[in-house]
Structures are given as structure tokens and as C-alpha cells.
Amino acid sequence: MAHVPLISEEKENISFAMHIPDPAKSWAIYGFIKPHVIHYYSLDVKRGQRIYLSLIKSANPQEMDFDPVMILIGPGIEISDNAPDWIQLPKDLGGLVATTKNASIATYEPFGPSSFIEMAELDLPAPGSGRYYVAVYSKSTHGHYGLVAGFREEFSFVDRIVSPIRLIFVWLWSGQSPGTIIIPYFVAEIVGILIFWRSSRRTAYSFAGTMAAFLFMATSATVIGQTAFNLTRAPFGPEVYISLTIALFHSILGVISLRLARNEAGMLQRSLMGIIGTMALLAGSGLIMGPILAIAASMLPSMKGSVPSTLGPRS
């Protein structure tokens, strides 16, 4: 159910199509398209290898009339009668137009979390070896679409690190404002600064650990907020409990980090802070900065005992 999110390069010439490096790995490529504009994607497939493609659109009520179309172009594919004349078909390659679904009910995706409406799907063995292309276009209206390619759900180390940033684009893609997305992190950092300032243990270790803790909690709040938002567009299902479990995990990281930051920084505490930072980095918690602060806290100086509240910040 999980896809690696990518931002579309929106290539309008088939010669410069955005290349999908691993056609078996599950990707979700998000883009925006205008009427009578075509976006091209390419993938290299061997004969008999499974090709799985799905075309989705945003569940934004303002784009309900948006009706994108997907065409698979490649060797061994016959030219479809309903393929438009303005689609670029390279020599000796045919084009298969995916049948558009009359879908109106949105699907809830729990790992984002997000929601979408599935428009079309292709699942077939490659009739020949070579380079295949996917063309996405709209006949009459503009809107936000997503091209899902591949079926093997896996995340590399880099995917895990950058996915939280890419998810922000996905939420913008769904029609949300930047302020709505950033507010939990902004509020969390203000609360973290106030709590640190009122603490009697104002050290570099405590500051970095406290700020990391509240970034983890902000991620938890973001997941809960996005779950609530997307349930206004998609029906409630068991997938929601996956989102709530993810939110609980982020909050646990935050609570443990805060307790460690407010206590003495011994060897055990520093080791635990470093472990939590690493776990958070792999789990996409804290918007990258949180894990960095937690790992940094495990190495920053900390004075034993309490610092009198009448003194200013010390490191």
C-alpha cells in the first residue's frame, strides 16, 4: 500500500520523458496538467515482465470534473482506435489507452496519510523487451494527477530520509495550504522554546533534545491532522488504524526524547538519544531536523547538576 512519492518533471516531449528507474518498485509520481497538454514517462522492461500502472487524481472537491487519461506506448502493443492523433507515437510502437473508471469514492492512503480517486489501471505482461512510455493528458479541464508505477513496496535509505519532505508536496497537491501543513511544527517549536527557557537545566544538550522531542510530537500531530482532513474526503476504514499507530509511534519518540533532555546527560542517556535520533531518521519523524537535533544532542556538552534559574542560558 506504500509508494515512494516523486514530483513529476512534467516533460511534454516524448524524447525527454521522465524516466522511472525501476519499473517494479512502487512509485507515486504527482503532477499538475492543463487541457491538451501531455506528460511523458519512460520505463525499460523485458518481455514477460509485469507492467503495473495506475492513474489517480486528487480527491479535492474542486477538481471532481477533472478526467485525466493514461496511454501505455511500447513494442508489441497495437495502436488503439481511441488514441488521439496528437499523441507522439515513435516508429513501430503502439499505444494502449487505459479504460477510465467512473470512480467517485476516494481511497484513503494510511502511510501519508492522504486520499485520492483512482481513474484507470493497467496490469499486463510486457509483450516485448525495450523502452515503454506512459502518456498522461486531459481533454478538457486542468487538475492534479498521480501516476502509480510498479508493485513492489520498498523504501531505500534515501527514500526514508526525504519522504517526509516529499509528503509536504503531496499534501499541497491535494489542495491544502502551506500554512495548514506547517502550523503543527511552528507551534511545537514555540512550545519547546518556552519549556526549555522555563527549565532549570538550560544546556546545549537539553536544548537540542527538547527541540527534537517537540518536532517528533509535531509529526504525530501532523499525522492525526492529515488523517482527520482526509477522512472528510474518503470513507473510514481499517487503514485509519495504521495512521493512528504511526502517530502513536512518533509521539512515543517525542515523549522519551523530552524525558531524556530534561534529565542528566549520562552515557546511557546520550546513547539512547542517539538511538532515538537514528530511529526517527529512518521513520521519517521530525521533518529531518528533529533526528539531526537528537543525534547532535547525544554529543553536545551538558553540565551536571542544575543551573540557577536567575542565570542566562549556558552551554
Image (cartoon, rainbow, N blue to C red):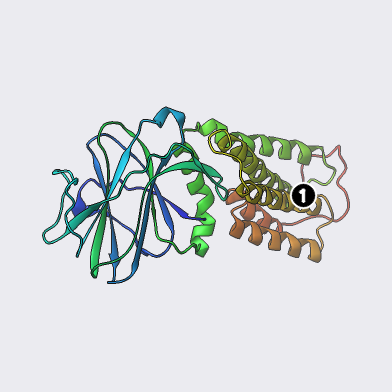
Instruction: Work out whether residue 41 or residue 103 is closer to the camera in this orientation and state it.
Output: 103
| Residue at numbered disc 1 | 255
Instruction: Work out whether residue 313 or residue 177 is closer to the camera in this orientation and state it.
Output: 177
Relative to 152, is 129 on the left or the right? left
Q: Position of residue 42 (x, y in %)?
A: 27, 58
Relative to 65, is 204 on the left or the right? right
Crowding at label 1, few (<14), some or many (≥20) Cα neighbours within 10 Å?
Answer: some
Q: Residue at x 42, y 63 (%)?
A: 25
Instruction: Work out whether residue 197 or residue 226 is closer to the camera in this orientation and state it.
Output: 226
Q: Residue at x 68, y 55 (%)?
A: 294
Relative to 263, is 247 on the left or the right? left
Local secondary structure at mark 1: helix
Q: Position of residue 292 (x, y in %)?
A: 62, 55
| Quarter of image, res 113 | top right
Looking at this view, name the residue that lies furthest to the top.
Answer: 62
Q: Position of residue 232 (x, y in %)?
A: 57, 33
In this orientation, does residue 299 appear?
no
| Quarter of image, res 193 | top right
Instruction: Work out whether residue 251 or residue 90 is closer to the camera in this orientation and state it.
Output: 90
Looking at this view, name the residue that lies furthest to the left.
Answer: 91
Relative to 131, is 190 on the left or the right? right
Report the amino acid beneath label 1.
Val
Q: Position of residue 301 (x, y in %)?
A: 74, 57
